[in-house]
Amino acid sequence: MRKRSPRHSTWRAFILVAGISAIVPASVHAEKRHILFNRDVRPILSNNCWSCHGPDTTVRKAKLRLDRREAATRKVIIPGKAQESLLIQRIFANDPEEVMPPAEHRKKLTTTQKNILRDWINQGAKWQDHWAWIAPRRAAGVPTGKDAIDFFIRRKLQEQGLQPSGEANSNTLIRRLSLDLLGLPPSSGEVSAFVKNNSPDKVDRLVDRLLGSPAFGERMAVYWLDLVRYADTNGYHADIEWSVSPYRDYIINAFNDNMPFDRFTREQIAGDLITGATMDQKVAAGFNRLNMKSTEFGIQDKEYLAKYAADRVRTTTTTWLGVTLGCAECHDHKFDPFTIRDFYSFAAFFADIKGLGYYPSAQKKGWGETIKATNPESTRRIIELEEILQGQPEGVLLADSRKTGQVWQYALKEPAEGWQQVAFDASAWKKGSGGFGSKGTPNSSIRTQWTTSGIWLRKTFKVDRVPDRATLNIQHDEDATVYLNGQKAAHLAGFSTGSPNYATHALNTGLLKQGDNLIAIRCSQTGGGQFIDAGIISGNGEKEKIEQEIARLSKNTRTMLATVSVQPRTMRVLPRGNWMDESGQIVKPSAPRFLGGEEATSRTALASWIAARDNPLTARVFVNRLWKLFFGTGLSRILDDIGSQGEWPSHPELIDWLAVEFMESGWDIKHIVKLIVTSRTYLQSSLQNAKLKELDPKNRFLARQSRFRLDAEFIRDNALAVSGLLVRQVGGPSVKPYQPSGYWENLNFPRRTYSADKGSSQYRRGLYTHWQRQFLHPSLLAFDAPSREECTADRPRSNTPLGALVLLNDPTHVEAARALAQDILADGKLKDNRSRIKSLVMRVLSRPALDEEITVLSSLLEKHRKEFADDPDSAHRLAAIGQHPLPQNVSRPELAPWISVTRSLLNLHETITRN
Amino acid sequence: MKPSRATSTPDALLRRSFLKKSGLGIGATALNSLLRAEAPATANQPALPPRCKRVIVLCMAGGPSHLETFDYKPKLAELHGQPMPKSVTENQQIAQLQGEADKLKVLGPQHAFSRHGKSGQQISSVFPHIASKIADDICIIRSMQTEQINHDPAHTFMNTGSIISGRPAMGSWVNYGLGSECSNLPGFVVLTSVGGGQSQPIAARQWHSGFLPGQFQGVRMRSKGDPVLYINSPDGITPKRQHDVIKTVQKLNEIGNQTLADPELETRINQYEMAFRMQMSVPGLVDFSDEPEHILNLYGTKGADGTFAANCLLARRLAERGVRFVQLYHRGWDHHGNIKQGIGHTAKLVDQASAALVLDLKQRGLLEDTLIVWGGEFGRTPMAQGSGRDHHIKAFSIWMAGGGIRPGFTFGATDDLGYHAVEDVVDVHDFHATMLQLLGINHEGFTYRYQGRDFRLTDVHGRIIEEIIA
């Protein structure tokens, strides 16, 4: 594509001109520590050499590969003889024409790096396959369970001459565990109970309780939704809303139900292909439809199909495999053995998904295939009701006319006496289908007109067995008298509406008999809006009510973009990623060849390959990211690249042990989480001493716990939880918290205004926030929540003035401060300011207040108390922020200074930090 | 930071309490965070002699037609109404004219061109101010090309050098590289205005810091509501009360830090100070009452009303205060139909103020170290789309001025029909490379490690356009 600057010197030139003396330092024989290829050498070669001497054939210089031992030792490396190896001569060369890497490459080797390469060759130039490409194995001689974690961590600490830290105090532990496992702080009551508890298994029991909380799934979903780029809008151009929230709820439930990760994988990648797929599995497969899509007029269908395909490759491989196969869209990968063909073969797995590139008028027509997904709560209730129905034997004795018109004999003029008796001769009466009534009566299906003031009806019906209980279902407008076999069975005054159900009336079954029975009804209507219809069922009528309830719940659905499999599109290699170039070879679905991928037929095969016991990547990637959730940094720090350019893990045997444990436990997520968070390593204090600060400033050896800022959603959740505003409803459509007006002004097609939710929807957890890809809610954005336009494995943790402005001024946080202040003032047990401040600190920070802190907060309180007393209008305006009710009898000038106190607390570094 | 009228009047109480920390502007903070962010050791200060310190991009969103603005094509007038030669359009990517390949007709220039200034630059009559006032100050590039033919990805490409979301905007890169010179405003500010044509949406992605640390993200300033999101204290909270709360927060944080010694906490303290300084300085920034009448007249604005003219004046005020990168979007250049009137209308909304910005910076001595860029995300087709023109990627025009740019110069050329840039082609990566060069940053060495790869604004491309550098 682009002209490249000319290369002055090449390996080839050098190899041809043999015998040039390179200067290798005399210290070449000073062998030091044992060099490990993967730990020491691979990062140097990958980062500095492989972009020209690596897997990508198109840019390879001097036909030299340095990513394979055979190739390298054939040309430039002589094992055991560094001085004679061209590689060493060239990297130590002083001549700028000769030195490698060449000057224009902009990579320079440090002396340490050069020495490592030299020593490594002298030690025999032993090669290792990249650690992550080899299936993980458990190291021998390791204790079982969580002790394994401590075993590996402490062994390394010992090597480094470091001591582990002691266990954190109980206040810190319960807050850490609650925030890590739920994304929510503990309540004051939970804290004091935990602190008082002296039993040795109290951490275990706490962890079990937290893992059983529905908030666990919400917390885990936050991390997963970044990966699968879950959002409520299409992302490109018009960025309009679509409905995918059932998928979000599926993820929450899956984590809560501890769904095995292999099943979790299969349902998302190929749930639609499972025989007899359940609604949940179909919803899960919606993962394949979460990518950005465009409805911008004038775009090219083919171009956008190519964009979507590439996005699916990037997302799926980053999410499950932690590799950057996405980099092989235009050329072979520069650092890992992925070919461009691997990229398009992987994309071919998704070629069967029905969809367009250009979605014309999606604002009206939507985004292709959808399904109606029942709300999880509704689904659960439906299952319960269906079970109840099983035990409700009910049968129809006399059908009413709601579904099908039933034929009755009827008279519109008052008949002779005894008309309701079995023996009465009604042969002169007319026949007509029910219901009977006049047009326009609400909730009535009228088949025979009745517009006069009264109607008389008769009908014979057969009863096989007289039931213990029988119920009359009737809609009457107005007074009706019902006779069975000549006896009065019911008199119903007034009218019933028929909505949602017919009125029910228990019948005396003594009036019924086996064989033929006669029902006779008289109904009168003096005004207008006549109607009468009736039927009899056995039982107490519950069945019908339940059926109606099931029907109602079933309608309580949300739409979900659906994955529908059709004849696959032809997938070819696009040379240089150019979608207009149709010269590339046609490819069939396949996982990357060097990882053992073979031609396959379906996404099901892909899911099986990903979650196979011998896939070297999936389990490692997952446990590494779990580690990050609970220590702030992964065992291998780079969460989205486990390949050559990734990081050699700080504890390679531990990551492998966890990966094997994960797979052998049946991909049991809660099991691994529990192992990690009950390990002594996890429970350590996070305090840093001077020695650790110097020797391990980034805490990679874990001689202590880490401290880090909460994720954006949990900053919100924390404020709502400590103030008591949080509404703990799980799942449902996305919600809209307060947002500065005009924030959406740059959206168009159509133009939109944002209106914040009222009532309980205002106080939901951050993960339910409406995720507008182009204009993500600014309070989330300020704390690094990603727009989810792309798969994101790792959020940065910024510390910016914009974040400070959110905590200071966002109405959500001001309202939380107000609610918290209100709550404290309303607590009759707290008699003075000191005890109120102490209670506040406990609620916000889960620990007792220091005297110094009480002094600082008291002086703010006193200062602002005077100010607001002099300026009650300000107090009223401050107290009016937010929808949370404020009783009339609360003095605003009394409340306002407390809001200053609670605002201060909610803005503390400690408040948004997990220690 | 250059002292100026507006920055010399911060709240006294803030000076009193923050004096001891004032050495820690965001520059120092940024550097601290950078060191901790484990960024590779790239040049975070100019490696080359810089020609400018800051950039103002006037982004003409929607894709202004080069054929009605800066690229005069007499041949097009000659062929007006005739079929477009197949040889030119064959196998070329087409946007809304898809499916009409057999019916394409030439649309002649809809506005007259003439030569202007001593340099004799060809500028169309839709820009009387630019033509008569700054023709000798600007360098017109007529040979721009891009890769993306639709608005959304074309903007993303222009701003980030990539079409994949999540890459940092150029303003973020520049702030990452050079830090901010401003202790009370963000280093990257975005302004938007509308008018004159279809208002294409603009996503926040266009100024997002992507994988760079969050403090480098662009901050939007608005004419309605809070000028910066959450910049106003809660109702009932005076600046003094706000300051009391912040002071309390800082004191409590410091008490906590006696045992924690958390380096992140020091940064947090600095950010709260910065936040408060922003709260104090932004109202003065967006209040134009200190601008004399003749300056308001020069731009053609009455006050900070969110028009492009007001935004240009605001951009100057930001530049004066040391803001590193300012980007003004004017959303109104998407003229698929009735381009004659439409482009005249949109041009009228930006012409005077664009020229005023150059003149005003010049008279203040700021133009020499401020780079101004004027241009859209792509050009428009020589073929008619009804009475308008469709999106076009093979040629478009931009102009640059100030900050080391060769003034009064036209660079590059398109073919006779204005379809293909044929001479001295400049692509988006070249533009980025040149901009970074002017700022003293070598684009090939300016990297950030993400997903195991050293990313650059210019990816693996970019040629520095030496010819346009003075």
Image (spheres, coloured by chain):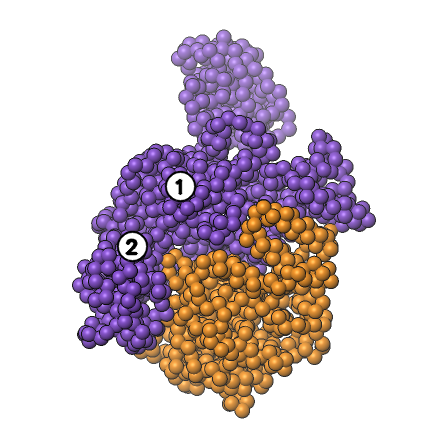
Chain colours: A purple, B orange
What percent of the width, then of the height, locates residue A135?
A: 27, 45
Q: Is residue B257 left or right of residue A177?
A: right
Q: Is residue A592 left or right of residue A383?
A: left
Q: Is residue A893 above or below residue B293?
A: above
- Name the image quarter holding the N terminus of chain A: bottom left
Q: Is residue B75 above or below residue A878?
A: below
What is the spatial separation of the Cα atoms under label 1 and label 2, in whole angstroms? Answer: 22 Å
Are the two marked residues, 1 and 2, in contact with CB atoms closer than 8 angstroms?
Answer: no
Q: Residue at x 66, y 58 (%)?
A: B276
Q: Is residue B281 above or below residue A367?
A: below
**Amino acid type assigned to the residue bearing label 2 in the image:** Ile
Tell if the residue under mark 1 belongs to the same chain as the one under mark 2: yes
The chain that hosts pointer 2 is A
Q: Nearer the viewer, residue A420 or A344?
A: A344
The chain that hosts pointer 1 is A
> Would residue B52 be visible to someone looking at this image?
yes
Helix, strand or loop for disc 2: loop
Q: Nearer the viewer, residue B249 or A461?
A: B249
> Would residue A720 be visible to someone looking at this image?
no
In the displayed orientation, state which residue is furthest to the bottom. B118
**Amino acid type assigned to the residue bearing label 1 in the image:** Arg
Mark 2 sits on what residue? Answer: A35
Mark 1 or mark 2, which has the lower sequence index?
A: 2
What percent of the width, then of the height, locates residue A336?
A: 29, 57
Q: Residue at x 44, y 64 (%)?
A: B41
Q: Residue at x 51, y 41 (%)?
A: A685
Q: Nearer the viewer, residue B289 or B279?
A: B279
Mark 1 sits on what residue? Answer: A154
In the displayed orientation, state which residue is furthest to the right. A870
